[in-house]
Amino acid sequence: MQTRNINLTINGKKYELVVDVRQSLLELLRERGYTSVKQGCGVGECGACTVLVDNVAVDSCLYLAVWADNTTIRTAEGECRDGKLSPVQEAYMEAGAVQCGFCTPGLIMATTAFVEENKGKTLSRQEMKKAHAGNLCRCTGYQTIINAAEEALKK
Amino acid sequence: MAIGKSHRRKDVRAKVTGKTRYTDDYSMPGMLEARYVRSPIAHGLVKNIDTTAALALPGVEAVFTFADVPKNVFPTAGHPYSLDPDHQDVADRLLLTDHVRYHGDEVAIVVARDRLTAGKAAKAVVVDYEELPICVTSAAALAPDAPAIHAGGNILKSTSFEIGGSLAEAETRADLTLQGTFRTPIVLHCHLENHTAYAYMDDNDHLVIVSSTQIPHICRRIVGQALGMEWSRIRVIKPYIGGGFGAKQDVVLEPMVAFLSTKLGGAPVKIEMDREECLVATRTRHSQTVTARAGVTKDASITFIDLDVISNTGAYASHGHSIPMAAGSKCCHLYPRAVTKFSAISHYANIPAAGAMRAYGSPQLFFGMESLLEEAARSIGMDSVEFRLKNCARPGDIKAKTGEYEHAVGIKECLEKGSAAIDWEAKKKRYATQTGNIRSGLGVACFSYGSGTYPACVEIAGCRLVLNQDGSVHMQVGATEIGQGSDTALAQMATDTLGLSYDRIHVVSEQDTDVTPFDPGAYASRQTYVAAPAVHAAADKLKRKILTHAALMTDESVENLNLANGNIVLQDQPEKVVLDLRDLALDSYYHKDRGGQLTAEVSSKTRTNAPSYGCTFVDLEVDIEMCSVTIKNIINVHDAGRIIHPLSATGQVHGGMAMGIGMALFEELMIDSETGWIYNGNLLDYKIPTCVDIPDLESEFVDTFDPTSPYGNKSLGEPPIISQGPSIRNAIWDATGVKINEMPMTPKVLFTHFRAAGLL
Amino acid sequence: MFPIENYHYATSVEDAVQHLAAYEGTKILAGGTDVLVRLHEGKSGYGHLIDINGLDELKTISMDESGTIFIGSRATFTEIITNDIISRNVPMLAQSLLTIGGPQVRNTGTMGGNICNGAVSADSACAALVYEFDLQIQGTEGERRESIHGFHTGPGRTILQQGDLLKSFVIRPENYTDFKASYIKYAMRGAMDIATIGCGAAIKMHGEEVETFKLAFTVAAPTPIRCPTAEKTMKGAVISEESLKRLADAVAADVKPRTSWRASKEFRLHIIRTLAKKVTRQAVDNQGGTC
């Protein structure tokens, strides 16, 4: 088994790890209890495993754990601080953008990256949709998700 | 009142923070991973199977083949058990088979200490097959010389009924008779959480299964049947579920994980399907061919509707013939003054097994029915909406037809509301004369549906309420939350009947068949309808117990007391608080001489079935050269009785609409008709709509109250998916003059039709 | 867990090239959006990997004084799309890359991978062909420059030899200056899809007349292609219904679409003709292309 030593920060906590080079970032995170990170396809089609690596949204299923060396990772668990939801989480809750919830944490991270990148901009619904096209949802028809993104952008 | 308000969903905070745990979020030390060995051919017999190389791999614990499994043939459909042997589901499955019937069928299974090894070992199992002739299509499967896929032949069942009068007589009254044949695709559920389950034993004769299922109690029974175990020795736990849409209304992995654990000394064994397996080796939506006939008079009365369905159920029966029959019985509520004849034949074929999928045969049937009736309206020169308004159900029709109960009927209001919302009349005029490459069109289609499965199946539901020491109430229901929001809706009902605040009702969302009240589960848009009486009765019972205890504590008579906003108040002076419920609760638990834990439990059977209604209006644009359709505006209007939770109800409608648009314009599992080879069993090639593919969605409700539910509500889970296909088809016809009688209406299908029509 | 059998984390371009040359069948792992998918599928031939994610020198996007643009092979789609040099000078490249997958895939996938995996449907290929990319390649014998023309040799095949590592793409100023360009991806979905047909055009006008016209297709032949016959018909032409019809008629001689379960030859041919016209109009309308 080939391994590499990596250092990374997950939701503000520092880790020094020896990781199997065959492991995905998805597996690394789930093994450490960050189970908001869901596997829906394993090939970057559904976005359920979306996390932020240095504030950039990636599919953690298609991302080797070793690549996370010297990075800062954010997952949905870490967005709620001291019991207070992030503006994006709040927006999802208020908009009714949550049904089965399996796609939700990944979508919340995609919206978070989107909102942080476009703060203060006025964007069309179509542009907002394009920014969420990497996440599949089969429950909501995306309507309330885009409503949530729209609200979160205003906050 | 909690009902009618969009209270915060019970699970929403947990879901946005990623705290809700799904099956794969639980793990056990020493959990073994199992992976199937699947057939690379669509029909054949295993001649030889060699597991030596697989067993030799380090980390492999065991390999089981068809030779090792119990010979108990079992059914898999998520229906309640039936006391009538003729009505029981077809038992045609073994855990593994040496007669493979579709590309991906299961011949062996490998258990290893990790997933990677299990995968490698599954590949190392060498299987020799004798190939058998293959039938993929209905025509091939029903041909006289077709190879038999099961011992009894390829026809699973064939039935018909006639309702509302005599077809022969109604035919003579028609001035015009129309006919058409309509084809619908194999569609996949694509719930975001794949099928996954694990099992372990916590005693020599007690099995625990944790599974992503819509039907924990049915699952327990079927595992018992498959393994020949007493049902009570099996415990099924349902954590949070990442969507099901019917694919998890079937027993798929549970008997196998249970079997493996029993074989491996009770060790925890898990099967976590990957996406590609989940798409083709679980269940699909039946592809159907609907031949529809209808008769109309010159003054636009439909005299008869005659529907003939060929339903391809694939390699195994699963829900089988129930699918076309359920849709057939529910469609009669829409135009009840017409005579309806319905016939269906269900058959096997060498393709993945079809099962339940959202709206259970109705999207297929209404594609045929509402497309043909569009033709009827146009043939007599009547506006599509006016034609439907003239023929659709009116209050009193259903009672007249069934002779049973009065139900709310709001389809007329749905049509009026939808027509106004989309600006039907003005747009109709604007679109009347169009030429050129880009053309707009308007379409409408209606549907009717049921609320539950009665009288085909038993409708049983259960609710248990417990007053906690702090004055809050724990609610347990057999109704299964799978994401649709049933926990929240049922908590709202309990809130109103009890007189507590919504925040004081806690729902136990995880289910456990050892503990959870009996209810067969999430399907048939039944839960809020059939659980409502149980919740109502249990809440009423608990309230009476609380008031009785209050009477003991206060010297007031029970009749003078009431529960409101979490306090005991005087019946005729509700502002006068007599007792805080918290104090009452503590007293009931801990007073040495009186009270006890105050609980109420009700199991109830529902013997009504309220029809629900609705319609889709669509305004779209066709780019003929690009063979593309762009939806400009799409609206669903529903008569679902009283709306319990407007935001969740709207969410159900949006989700159904998007799925319906997917079926109409994007989705089809493609299978080679010669070899049975599956071309697109992955999420790249099977095209479910992404965010950019779905237009902004509109939904409306009409205000009705169904008298058969204590809260006035009717079904809403499945109906939103039914009418997009025919409305889009009718709008494309409106825009281009081209009738497309097949779904999905993808660019390549449009190309073929546009070229045949001389548009290209 | 991916079934990786042998993994080497390259420390320099030379180190990568040495390893590539030394171990037959070793694949380069960059963004992972292709190679890791193949591994997940259990496809053979991907077990031995050289990971070049440590080679930051391959990420640079720059322009020299002459106006020549260099795009490092490891630059992600997003890095290219959001780069000012790209959006100012070759906006059609950004427009093309925006049609790839979804945001997450664009955040990790690289243009080096998109071109080097030889995909017939590569969304960057039309831009590469009409902007006449050169490819700077490091091989065991040293560095060399190859043209994009002839780079693709068949479905999934390129001229790259074992031991070759693409370092960067080079775009010369004469190939973008004064060109207007556009790309249309024809796919079954608006995102997360592969092209049924991809079509790119670059056009340089002289007054009302077309001075230079370049047209490229993906999925229209066994490799991404340019369309010499069709391009000729536009030389000196004025953009009109007639000239575009001539273009659409001529393009049939350049393409060789095939029937597969995804689409029939006839359908693809129809779309090819339609896109040739549409993309040309769009290129002219675009003042250099918008995203």
Image: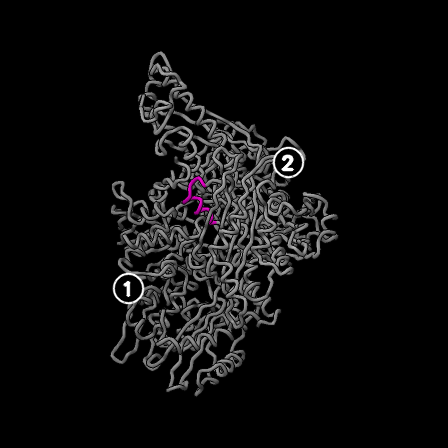
B411 part of magenta stretch? no
Q: Residue at x 42, y 24 (%)?
A: B542
What chain is tagged by disc 2? B
| Image quarter hosting the C terminus of chain C | bottom left
- Relative to B617, is C80 above or below? below
Contact check, label 1 and label 2, Cβ < 8 Å = no
Give how far across and how far down residue C107 sits, in percent.
Answer: 34, 60
Give how far across and how far down residue B576 sits, in percent.
Answer: 31, 24
Give how far across and how far down residue A98 sits, in percent.
Answer: 39, 46
State the CA–CA distance, disc 1 to disc 2.
78 Å
Q: Which mark is residue B403?
A: 2
- Relative to B262, is B557 above or below? above
Main SS, magenta residues = helix
> Within the image, what quadrant is residue A110 found in?
bottom left
- Is residue B388 visible to the viewer in this orientation of the structure? yes
Magenta stretch bounds:
B643-655
- The amino acid on which the numbered mark 2 sits, given as a three-letter code, is Gly
- Label 2's element? loop
Q: Which mark is residue C56?
A: 1
